[in-house]
């Protein structure tokens, strides 16, 4: 087993990994920029080392991080998600220096990070992909020609894209002409590559993804699906496992496809195979994420499998502890990404000091976070400050538990998306399990109610404070 792991990340995912290390008897090393000096992951790790004043560049400095791992006696690095987690050069640097990279090989990361190569691999394996180009576009002329053949609308995507960046929907030739150079510019700035490809736009799809685990002995299993259709501008907000919109036949079919996809590229570690389901019920491969996902928590919740621990065990050369027939799902889990944003003000980021924080608890509730009372949310990173995960035996009970947990949660000093999620939970289409990726866009008025709910919650909190002060 590994003895000491450097966690090349920050925030809640760093805390999550450090906790897994503690349970496995493995020492953990945290890294931090000055802006994260008082972050919870720094406090929780066995050791912590500064990356300097720049809030971002230190987390992206491959050679410094690998050198630090060697200097502190670490035999492995866990990249978490974001930052360098899907950087093939980072994985290769670890391999060259004799440090175990907790994730798939550099070649697999590179291959699946290139969306056109991934499409080619899936096509060869018999996994359905959306109609489009299986290679990079040569120029705008080729893009217009392909779009004319497969029909509008189309999606213009960065080949090395991810996280919702470098993607534009084009409903006409004029849209495509207008967006072509824009997407290339976004791709170059965000990913350092100007390549783009084109595929048919699946209108109002469901976004369904499969969690997979694979070891170095050829074993590969899936941990069922997650429904990530509730999203805004290609950023996921609420995730559900399993999907209340699939039947058992679809569930088994997708699970089999995910395992085929992973085996086709020689995948090891934890990964996610993402699909789109169109209005007629057909599924199409979208991409594979070669890292632990933000929403891995709900797969853990319905199966009881510790995904981060399995990642670490696989990296140490150990086989998976579970066969497919031994992984049983139970109930429904919902994850809410609580973001430091104001839904009443077009989701404007809301950073600053947290004057009071109370984490929800009780049966079937889990909170993954790195915040605490007195912590200051820095403005340099993703706006997600916590993940609230609820579980119940039925879909209806999971919704009720989610509502109770969100109401229990207190984050004072900043605005959050909590009141917006309460509105979604009470929408009849969501409660009936009928939603697509267009749900947020189709219901803009949901944000109008959040201000009223916020005032009601403030009045209730004030009444509690007054009663407590009066000794009642």
Image (spheres, rainbow, N blue to C red):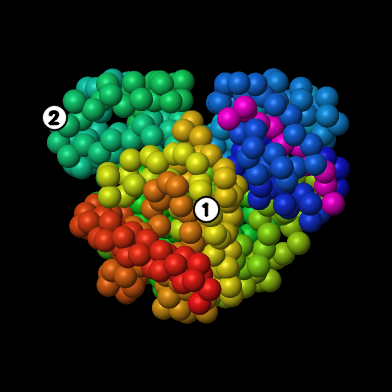
Q: Which residue is mark 2?
A: 174
Residue 438 in sight: no
Residue 56 in sight: yes
Mark 2 neighbour class, 10 Å CA radius: few under 14, some 14 to 19, many 20 or more: few
In the rendered image, residue 89, in percent from the top left (x then y), is placed at 63, 25
Q: Which of the 4 quarters of the picture holds residue 340?
A: top left
Towards the viewer: 98 or 71: 71
Position of residue 395 relative to residue 240, above or below, is below
Residue 30 part of the magenta segment? yes
Please identify, in this view, whether the residue under mark 1 or under mark 2 is nearer the observer.
1
Q: Magenta region's main secondary structure? A: strand
Tell me whether circle 1 and circle 2 mark residues in contact (CB < 8 Å). Answer: no
- The number of numbered badges drawn on the structure is 2
Q: At 53% across and 44% down in the image, what residue appears? A: 289
Q: At 75% across and 34% down in the image, what residue appears? A: 48
In the rendered image, residue 230, in percent from the top left (x then y), is placed at 36, 56
In the rendered image, residue 2, in percent from the top left (x then y), is placed at 84, 44
178 relative position to 393: left or right: left
313 relative position to 466: left or right: right
Q: At 38% across and 34% down in the image, what residue appears? A: 165
Between the C-alphas of marks 1 and 2, the distance is 50 Å
Q: Which residue is mark 1?
A: 356
Mark 1 neighbour class, 10 Å CA radius: few under 14, some 14 to 19, many 20 or more: some
Q: Magenta residues, as a range?
A: 25-35
């Amino acid at each position: 087993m590994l003895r000491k792991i450097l966690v090349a990340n920050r925030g809640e995912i760093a805390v999550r990994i450090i906790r897994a290390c503690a349970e496995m008897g493995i020492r953990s090393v945290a890294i931090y920029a000055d802006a994260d000096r008082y972050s919870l992951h720094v406090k929780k790790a066995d050791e912590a080392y500064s990356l300097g004043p720049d809030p971002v560049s230190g987390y992206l400095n491959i050679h410094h991080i690998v050198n630090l791992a060697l200097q502190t006696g670490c035999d492995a690095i866990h990249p978490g998600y974001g930052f360098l987690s899907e950087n093939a050069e980072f994985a290769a640097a670890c391999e060259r220096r004799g440090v175990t990279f907790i994730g798939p090989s550099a070649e697999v990361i590179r291959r699946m990070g290139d969306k056109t190569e991934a499409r080619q691999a899936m096509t060869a394996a018999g996994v359905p992909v959306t109609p489009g180009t299986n290679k990079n576009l040569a120029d705008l002329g080729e893009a217009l020609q392909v779009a004319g053949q497969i029909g509008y609308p189309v999606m213009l995507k960065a080949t090395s894209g991810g996280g919702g960046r470098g993607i534009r929907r084009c409903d006409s030739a004029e849209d495509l002409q207008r967006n072509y150079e824009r997407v290339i510019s976004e791709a170059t700035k965000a990913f350092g590559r100007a390549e783009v490809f084109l595929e048919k736009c699946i209108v109002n799809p469901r976004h369904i993804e499969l969690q997979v685990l694979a070891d170095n002995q050829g074993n590969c299993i899936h941990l069922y699906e997650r429904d990530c259709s509730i999203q805004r501008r290609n950023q996921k907000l609420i995730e559900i496992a399993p999907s209340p919109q699939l039947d058992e036949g679809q569930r088994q079919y997708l699970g089999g496809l995910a395992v085929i996809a992973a085996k086709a590229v020689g995948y090891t570690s934890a990964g996610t195979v993402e699909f789109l389901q169109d209005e007629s019920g057909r599924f199409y491969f979208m991409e594979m994420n070669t890292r632990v996902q933000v929403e891995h928590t709900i797969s853990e919740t319905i199966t009881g499998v510790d995904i981060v621990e399995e990642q670490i065990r696989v990296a140490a050369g150990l086989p998976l502890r579970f066969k497919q027939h031994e992984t049983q799902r139970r109930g429904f889990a919902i994850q809410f990404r609580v973001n430091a944003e104001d839904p009443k003000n077009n989701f404007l980021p809301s950073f600053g000091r947290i004057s009071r924080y109370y984490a929800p608890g009780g049966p079937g509730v889990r909170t993954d976070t790195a915040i605490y009372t007195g912590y200051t949310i820095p403005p340099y990173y993703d706006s997600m400050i916590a993940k609230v995960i609820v579980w119940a035996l039925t879909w209806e009970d999971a919704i009720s538990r989610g509502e109770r947990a969100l109401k229990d949660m207190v984050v004072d000093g900043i605005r959050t998306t909590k009141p917006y999620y309460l509105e979604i939970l009470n929408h009849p289409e969501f409660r009936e399990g009928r939603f697509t990726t267009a749900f947020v866009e189709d219901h803009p008025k949901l944000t109008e109610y959040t201000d009223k709910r916020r005032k009601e919650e403030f009045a209730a909190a004030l009444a509690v404070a007054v009663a407590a002060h009066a000794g009642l």
